[in-house]
Image (cartoon, coloured by chain):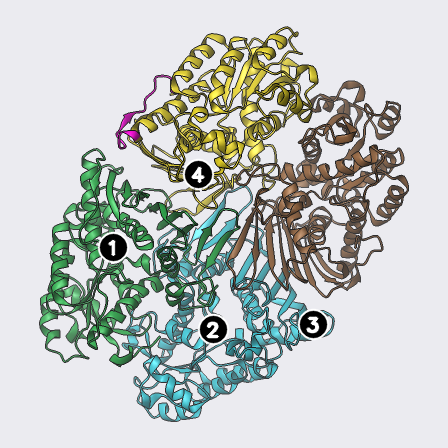
Chain colours: A brown, B cyan, C green, D yellow
Amino acid sequence: MDTTNGKLNRKLNMALIGGGAGSFIGRVHATAAVLDNRAALVAGALSSNPERAKASAPSYDIKENRAYTSIDELIAKESKLPEGERVDFVSVATPNFTHFELAKKAVEAGFNVICDKPMTFDLDQAEDLLKTVEASGVVFAVSHNYTGYPLVRQAREMILSGELGEIQAIRSNYIQGWLRSRLEEEDQKQAAWRTDPKKSGAAGAFGDIATHAYNLGRYMTGLLPEEISCNLKVFVPGRQLDDYGHAVVRFENGALGTVTASQISHGRENDLFIEIDGTKGAIQWRQEEPNQMIVRCNGEPHKIYTRDPNASFMNGMGAAACRLPAGHPEAFFEAFGNVYRSAYDAMVARATGESFEKKETIYPNVYDGVEGMYFIQQCVASSSENGAWLPMKHPAARR
Amino acid sequence: MDTTNGKLNRKLNMALIGGGAGSFIGRVHATAAVLDNRAALVAGALSSNPERAKASAPSYDIKENRAYTSIDELIAKESKLPEGERVDFVSVATPNFTHFELAKKAVEAGFNVICDKPMTFDLDQAEDLLKTVEASGVVFAVSHNYTGYPLVRQAREMILSGELGEIQAIRSNYIQGWLRSRLEEEDQKQAAWRTDPKKSGAAGAFGDIATHAYNLGRYMTGLLPEEISCNLKVFVPGRQLDDYGHAVVRFENGALGTVTASQISHGRENDLFIEIDGTKGAIQWRQEEPNQMIVRCNGEPHKIYTRDPNASFMNGMGAAACRLPAGHPEAFFEAFGNVYRSAYDAMVARATGESFEKKETIYPNVYDGVEGMYFIQQCVASSSENGAWLPMKHPAARR
Amino acid sequence: MDTTNGKLNRKLNMALIGGGAGSFIGRVHATAAVLDNRAALVAGALSSNPERAKASAPSYDIKENRAYTSIDELIAKESKLPEGERVDFVSVATPNFTHFELAKKAVEAGFNVICDKPMTFDLDQAEDLLKTVEASGVVFAVSHNYTGYPLVRQAREMILSGELGEIQAIRSNYIQGWLRSRLEEEDQKQAAWRTDPKKSGAAGAFGDIATHAYNLGRYMTGLLPEEISCNLKVFVPGRQLDDYGHAVVRFENGALGTVTASQISHGRENDLFIEIDGTKGAIQWRQEEPNQMIVRCNGEPHKIYTRDPNASFMNGMGAAACRLPAGHPEAFFEAFGNVYRSAYDAMVARATGESFEKKETIYPNVYDGVEGMYFIQQCVASSSENGAWLPMKHPAARR
Amino acid sequence: MDTTNGKLNRKLNMALIGGGAGSFIGRVHATAAVLDNRAALVAGALSSNPERAKASAPSYDIKENRAYTSIDELIAKESKLPEGERVDFVSVATPNFTHFELAKKAVEAGFNVICDKPMTFDLDQAEDLLKTVEASGVVFAVSHNYTGYPLVRQAREMILSGELGEIQAIRSNYIQGWLRSRLEEEDQKQAAWRTDPKKSGAAGAFGDIATHAYNLGRYMTGLLPEEISCNLKVFVPGRQLDDYGHAVVRFENGALGTVTASQISHGRENDLFIEIDGTKGAIQWRQEEPNQMIVRCNGEPHKIYTRDPNASFMNGMGAAACRLPAGHPEAFFEAFGNVYRSAYDAMVARATGESFEKKETIYPNVYDGVEGMYFIQQCVASSSENGAWLPMKHPAARR
């Protein structure tokens, strides 16, 4: 941990978009981003409501003169500040339908961006944003935060290095229960925009959480999808967007994947759970117990890999993502912070004029963001066509 | 527990078909059937090989003169014995392709039958057998043994009584790893016939274990299927039948079900796992830890129902299936024995001239057997048609 | 599995003492003893009440003429029967205060005995019985049934062979909650005699369950105790015997052991749990999840040994105690049956005139029974002397 | 979360003592203290080695002019700064033998203190420090960080409000394995001082971790100890301080407690585990899976309380300690931060001239620190007297 960011010799400056009263994910971004003291939150446009934007600033320790009321004001004023004082990156933590405009403006102004997922409202926006990012040279990360867990990264390196052999099956589930009733009718802000097709996009559960489940399988295995078949359901009467759904994914190498997402399973909290079968071994990981991963091989005892930065069974990516010794659990904030931390490495490289990887990054990036939007689009389309197989090979996908 | 079988005032007499050297399931039947001392194994046709049939008898304590070499001999000789001495029921524990002939002859001769699953080689045989059974008046059970677990029956009663509300989703998985390599090439008898389409039938993993997973969801919820889409895979090179597969089931009430079966997941043993979501509550149960079931309801702590015959939270079906107090674990044999025990109640009724339910039974029966064969047929057909939706409403299904 | 018992060429004949209506453990003995069809229950003295003794016989399928009303009648009549028809062994499944007389008479009459634990009412009786057994040549087993679990035996062989190095710590707990209220006042037969010092002996929880916990540690490690300090508590007002207690054991090799027993821990069922630390490795096993054992070694992933008779990590004792493949759970009855099964091997040896081990047996024996009574005596004495250290080296202990 | 600290209207200023290269706990303090942005780390005396003290500052983002080389320099220079710029509190994160001098000087200079545990080198120092604190009016917290877990606080409120009835038994274990080998010989800084009686104090494992286990039981139940009996072991040859030990605690109300600590259990990481039995209910909590607590009551399903700030089953203390919704796991840093956060409330009160509780605080304080040192002293003494019962009632204990 080096708060000076090496050659940069200073902390990075962060601006937060969103995060006003009632927000959940804005506070998470603010906490995770500074966990290692490599960045400081110095500016924000915390709400689309100017008064709320101003009023929310003190709770983030943002000075009044950098509590902006719009992205435009933020860009205009921050751009005039000298480097080192100026914001280095903008975190977009607003409802989905606003991501595109906010992120695009920030990118065009030369700011690095950490954008919440799903990246945009629809695929067109995502492809447009991709072009903007590619033209800009900025660092652009998408907060598929579950990729930041040390054991997820451990698994990724194990799989990419061939330790599990050829991957043949992925079963990825994201099961929640909080939308079992129509919270959106009860003035619950989180529920309200997520179930509103004008704010959330074409999908409900599939946009909000199946994208994470799909992304996690892709991140851990690197397998490339070929086609997808999906069935979405709206189980709670009166709701407009899917609150349950299931997709089957055929991968290029012949592997079969399944993605299930639910927001209506009583008592389930945030149960992102993945199982991956390879020809040489298999793994299983659950977000709610993130400090352990089960690794199995026929004829051997089941092995529990605990998050242990000092253990010889941990590989480089896994160990590097740890902050605490084994048995001292790490959790959600730390994983979220790891996405930031990895993006910081790239931001520092950019700031100091060094080259940096843009596509095959440790952190989820704009290419993953495009693929996530493609996933949503194809799932919704397949479901409306009775589960027809639709292509899932997007030219921008990482490979 | 009453070894006299009530009004019958004697133990029931059992004959075992199959179970010779190298058999697995024959020994299980023999052990489970007599667990409560309500039946005695007195006769057998333990192998299709006459010498092995004779040689295997002592290990079952079957007398030499009742160690038959064929079903025909068994029927011919047992039929001449007086009631009380004569075999009451025949357990068919042979490879799939022989079930039909054996079971049909036994039924036609008036013997009750406990038949292993899948019930027959194909659907035609199953429908034929159904007619034979309906015409006969015998008790006919199919050993979907996982339905015998106390907490499975507890769940069934909870759901049928409406405790979980309307059921909207079933996720049923049966994950094994033992066929990860080509055991069938290594003179492993269990693997050999299960992977041979001439002996196993149209499906591999889907016939052997997905039928259990599908049946379990049907048993626990009573939901009626409407249509099914399936994707089967042969992952181990050289194998002829599926060793992995996935099906999506649409139920008549709009619920969505998924069934996944694997025989190639490293280190996984016999992981039959089911989750059921209802509008009022949700449950989760795992065969490898059968003495507990998790019941969840939003806003309440997660509840672990342990198998506790004395607890007020246990219902009639659940408590009646227990033999031991809580904390004294019951397991595979006891559950298997519960299928037998429930069938015995019907056999005693028949023997004493009382009426007994034939379709909506506690134990899986010939109707479930037919539906299981229909499931296999439609899954294989759907998979060969690129996962097309095929009907899953069989006229014989329980409802 | 060989129901002919090899050279003996017949099943063993069993008589059950106790097990009348309201009994729990009698039925367990009857079920476990015949699980492998190596024995048949042919006689009994099922209750000290002659009418109940007679009335209970049909539920065990015991013929009327062998439903005796006392041990004396049983011995007198069975002794006159020819070998092969005559009872081979007597299972004593009555309240503690009757064990001694029943077992001693059976032994003196030349019958093998399986005696419930604790073996007698007090140590004097135990030492007397030991002499009787030593003089007799009979097979004598004590039903410390938890030693029959496959993974317990696996652990024993691992430890005795040095796989875990020198053993330095044992933490053994047996936690129940069923006597949280005064069930003994509510006509609950099990509770009534267990809490009555005239029937149970000097200890309550420590006699009923701490003996199991202590025995399990001794069985798994072979460590020899040096001295013991104990604190017993009566937490439920009005009760006469301990319902909670804790002992510290110093072993000869310097290891430190702890034994905790509770009958008053809300919601706890039958939670016998043991952890053992060696210089090379450590293990952990829990009776309520008996099909897995955790084995740990610094620097390695935690390993879950599942009960898998075919796995190379299983040793001879562990694999030999299995009846089913991995993932097909075994449980309480099977473990109980393993104690019987091991004793049967000795009985067959005796019956066929072969020599057999009497002290270092796989099954718990009369020496363990004596040590168990010594444990109870010293714990009660230590507790009454403010936890003073008392000797725990009994000359009869296995070593 | 209010980074302005309410009426104080600014962040609190922190100085860190210790935390130089090779430190573990210093970094934890630095991270946890600022997690909610209510404090900023502005100064430090990071090492007793002046060069290392200076060199370590940038990695904490401490400016050069506030990177002091001793507590004396820190006090001298900080005292001259105006309030608001001046350090508000000093975190002492050094080896045990230095705590007393550092903390005492800070307190005497009027700074609030967060002191690592055990609080001092011996009891005399602790009692001296207590007097100093009482005379000073500063806020003084001891980092028994495990008390900061939301479900620990939830349990505390449940118990203190009588929800579990009278508490009768506490079983508290803290099991580690990292000192299984003599790491102290291998230039491992953490191991070196912890096993050195000149730096660690009279106890090894019992000072380092049994104090946490003991404190946790005291914190959760409020039971007052009466006397204690202890057995300490040095299992690794050549080591001077205990690496394993066990204590029995008699509480004033008749309850029985046990505390076990190990540093030599292979593969065990940081397994602090507690079970508490009350007359109305029982709970169980494990630090390595901190987001759930099991609550049991006879006759009811076992209940898993998950850390869910929005659930009605959570009480005020439990919910107030959460930062994230259920299913989004919180862990070690957050719990550590909760101790800080609670202390901040008192610091803000002091700074704004309001009264604040000094003894019955939510955070562990100097009274707990004294009791911890008394616990160590009496355990070591009891162990050296063959486990004799020694008094455990310290006049300064919270009650």
Q: Chief secondary structure of the magenta span? A: loop
Specify the amino acid type for callout 3: Ser
Element type at mark 2? loop
Instruction: Please tell me how crowded label 3 is: few (under 14), some (14-19), or many (20+) other residues with Cα within 10 Å.
Output: many
Q: Is residue D35 left or right of residue D106?
A: right
Instruction: Please tell me how crowded label 4 is: few (under 14), some (14-19), or many (20+) other residues with Cα within 10 Å.
Output: many
Asked whether the residues under the numbered discs 1 and 4 touch, taking CB atoms below 8 Å apart as contact, a structural biologist would say no
Disc 1 to disc 4, C-alpha distance: 29 Å
- Which residue, given by chain and number where applicable, does mark 4 sit on? D263
Specify the amino acid type for callout 1: Arg
Tag of residue B383:
3
Q: Tell me where the magenta segment starts and ends, as one range.
A: D384-398
- Which residue, given by chain and number where applicable, does mark 1 sit on? C399
Point out residue A48 in the picture as x, y percentages from the top left corner.
Answer: 80, 30
Q: Which one is closest to the eye, mark 3 or mark 4? A: 4
Q: Residue at x 82, y 47 (%)?
A: A122
Q: Is residue B328 above or below residue A197?
A: below
Q: Is residue B331 left or right of residue A60?
A: left
Point out residue B372 in the picture as x, y percentages from the top left corner.
Answer: 57, 73
The quadrant of the image that shows the C terminus of chain D is top left
Q: Is residue D393 magenta?
A: yes
Tag of residue B143:
2
Q: Which one is closest to the eye, mark 4 or mark 2? A: 4
